Image (cartoon, grey):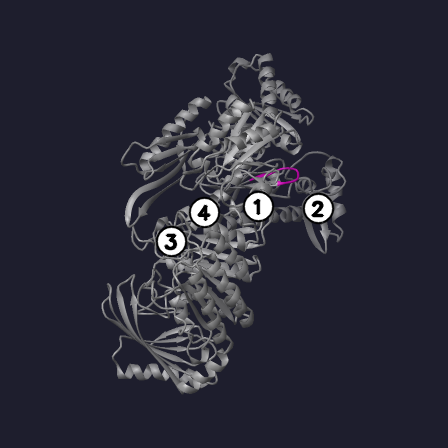
Amino acid sequence: MEAKPFGLVFFPAFDWSISPTHPEREERLLYTRDQISEEGLLDIPGIREYKPRLAKVADAERVHIGVPDIKSLITDAHLVSAGGAITAAEALMRGEVERAFALVRPPGHHAMRVVHGARGFCTINIEAIMVEYLRRFHGVGRVAIVDTDVHHGDGTQDIYYHDPDTLFISFHQDGRTLYPGSGFTDEAGSPQALGTTVNLPLPPGTTDEGMHYVLDNLVLPMLDEFAPDIIINSAGQDNHYSDPLASMAVTAQGYARLAEKLKADIAVLEGGYSIEDALPYVNTGIILAMAGLDYSRVVEPDVERAPRHTAKTAAYIEKLVLEQYALWCKRQELSHKAVLKSGDYWQRQRSIYYDSSDIGERQLENLRLCPECQGFMTVATEAEGGDSGYKSAFAAVIPRQPCGACRRQAKDAVLAAKRKGGFQHYIIQDKENDFMERL
Amino acid sequence: MLLGIDVGGTFTDAVIVSGAKILAQAKVVTTHGNLMYGLLAALDKVLVGLDIRRLDRVALSTTIVTNAVVEGKTDRVGLLLMPGPGMDITKLVPIEPYILSGYIDHRGREVVKPSSSEVEDVCRQLSGTDVFAVAGKFAVRNPRGEQAVGEQLARLAVPAYVTFGSTVSGTLNFWRRVNSAYYNSAVWRHFGRFAFAVRQALADRGVVAPVYVLKADGGTLPLEAAEDYPVEAVFTGPAASVLGIMALAAPEGEAVTLDIGGTTTDIALWKDGLPLFAERGAVINGYPTSVRSFWLNSVGIGGDSFVRWEEGLLVVGPMRKGPPMAVGGPVPTVADAMIVAGVTAFGDRDKAWAAMRQLAVNGEETKGLACQVLTAAAEKIVQAVKRMIEARAAEPVYRVEDIVYSKILEPKSVVGVGGAACGLAPLVAKGLGVSASVPEGAMVANAVGAAVAKPTLAITLRADTERRYFTVAELGLQNELKERRFLLADALEAANGYLARRASIAGISIDEVETVYAEEFNLVRGFQTVGKIITCQQQIKPGVFTRVSMREDI
């Protein structure tokens, strides 16, 4: 028996926790480690384990605008976890593996573009850091990110909300019933990227059948049509029926079959806090499925207690899929209309709460809807709370391939703001030159 | 007086070590049909003129187990597995296993008891088989399932021997334990016959000293104890060599050691004066096992390596076309180059020169060409050493601290043993920019290693203070944890106690104990710390009784 070339970056961070009794603690991947070791998965020909590299702060600043800066907000663990995702991507790019799984912690999908602290156990977005690394150093263009964590991947959504080259699909337990309380169908991207953010809120109690209905009838067809260069799976495992922080009913078999069908090039672990009853089995299932091996015997001892699929849930999901697919088919037309309606600029004002750091942020984004490029944007941010007190910054983001006007105007906007005063920090994130400038 | 015998692929060597000196040595040709002939010939030869009553110990490093596996001199084994949920292992093991439905989970909970009717059924199908191997997933955390099947086998099948997966290794890796348990049972009878023959032959000669067998981990076990775990005695040759180097040269700190033979060079890396162990275990016949062994890398360069030009480049090895031309071989070899370069002297010097002249197709100066050959050969070893250092640096670690503060191994010296060491080891050292040494006695390093290797044993203790029990896998123990407060330090102390018990059962004394690994996790349920999971493995530190040098008058 030989696996298809498969890379596993396993990093359980046995010496890192948010706090001793926090769900993100040393013990989280202990039983997963035990199961992987006991199965002997790493001895299977074709399966190769990689040691994560340490990401650079610059890798994080390619994505994030940290206030006051990223370095002071993170620990080494975050750089190992982001580095683990990059290690998985590098193994893929070198052609050493066909697929890779960064089974690492701490997670990242709740970390947004602007970072004041930690939200939903995340400080920096490890998938986004990996994706931007791939774009910068490996010429990857179109990317699809499928977030299968039970919580809405609001951080990843935020980072790619204006990017029509990144398709972000998140299915999750309905935000009316679960943290972070977002991820509704109307969050679909800013006008020029409308339709490349897809949210599929699922009712509590959704089972393998429900999840696979969404996958077969919506997610896979969308991926086919979008034709990305690379597919990333934000592989949270908290849709499991035993997860203590959510109310879904997916099994290890359901997750393994999802991994098999999705054929993600790279999976990155996100949440999943049923550390004894779910994670050992779900991770074993995903590894076997991604390596092209038989996973049919990966069954939880207590699988009988998983709730059954109900007609009500089925009906809801069928309707959701139908509506979303209709919108998907009309996305270009809808985007065109939205651009016309918005004019030259699109604005978004939000309050963002950092539950893990107890920080409240007010943020105003101003995006230029540029006919030549993705458009520059400015973001004005003020935060209060946590250990650091009041913090504020005004930043401009120059896109990867800016037109001359956007490039100039981005810089001018920050200079003007600085002259006017009122913020502590003035920052230009120059994605074209891969450079973070502080004025 | 310590007697060491190493049965190698070509020669069987014997040495007598006394008072840190090699008192006598003997070399005979290995007798492949029956290793005993060569072994006893070497024994008789080395003991000539010595008082056998002065022998304190006889230690054997043999290919008996390796050969039994390679030559298929193995028994039919009834392999009974309880894999529980997870990867399908059926096609991954050396023979078709019988799958039973009982299983243990990762916390050591017996989720499903083994089914007695299934065992009865297997016994009917296996009538006539009398050696068995029984292994369950996570049995190292609860041996009861394996033991229950064992008890039933004892009643129904009257087995000659049963190997339990959890006792061959206390470490997680079901697949490896299954393979270990299988091979242990498969070679059990063959090894038993060998042990019997050894005892009888020694008794015939009036040798009353205890007999020990070398294991792949470089430690020894009394012959009686080794009969229960013959699989441990696989691949002892390289282990004997590493131990020999320890006795003859005692490399300090970080070092590279080379055993340069006829066709291959075995490379070992050392840290803190000790050879590094393989991360998981030895591979037998293509099957990964849990047999602990040194981390060795074999590269196809040796004295007999074929030397030729390929597309304008001097190429050495990895193939061997025969012995060196100096002793009548067909093609130029590394050893011929060594003779011409003046670093060794054997065979017909003129034929060695003829070999190098034959190679000098572009009119190269003969001696210069010989040096070029040696440099090319050494370079291949240097590259292999560098790859090992890189592989070591790339070994996954699971703590942030170990990533941030990872340190790359920087060998400070090269020690070479084996026939071609004197020619190549200094050049390898030069390539790595470090110093070299080739200890005297390097030609019999393996036998020296066997002679002076200390006994070793390991024990794995795992305590689950929430579930209030602990297991000692190698002893098949699962006991209630009485102490309310049980920390890593307590676990280590308890493990030392069980190590002492296991050592006394095996009939060996403990010199120095070391921790192979130790970890301690807090168990949190509902934001409350409810207990700890502590795992540690303690072992008798592998090593040598004494440093050894050549007798002054040799």
* Disc nearer the start of the sequence (3/4): 3
User: Tag 3's secondary structure?
Assistant: loop
Nearest to the observer: residue B245 or residue B523: B523
Report the residue marked by disc 1.
Answer: B428
Residue at the front extreme, as displayed: A311
Residue A243 is marked as 3
**Numbered mark located on residue A300 in the image:** 4
Q: The numbered mark 3 sits on a residue in which chain?
A: A
Q: Position of residue A266 (x, y in %)?
A: 50, 60
* For residue B317, side relative to residue A416 (left or right): right
Q: Which amino acid does label 4 sit on?
A: Glu
Residue B260 inside the magenta-drawn segment: yes
Label 2 vs 1, first from the N-terminus: 2
Q: Distance between the residues labelled 3 and 1?
A: 56 Å
Label 2, label 1: how many angstroms apart (C-alpha)? 18 Å
- Helix, strand or loop at label 2? It is strand
Residue B307 numbered tag = 2
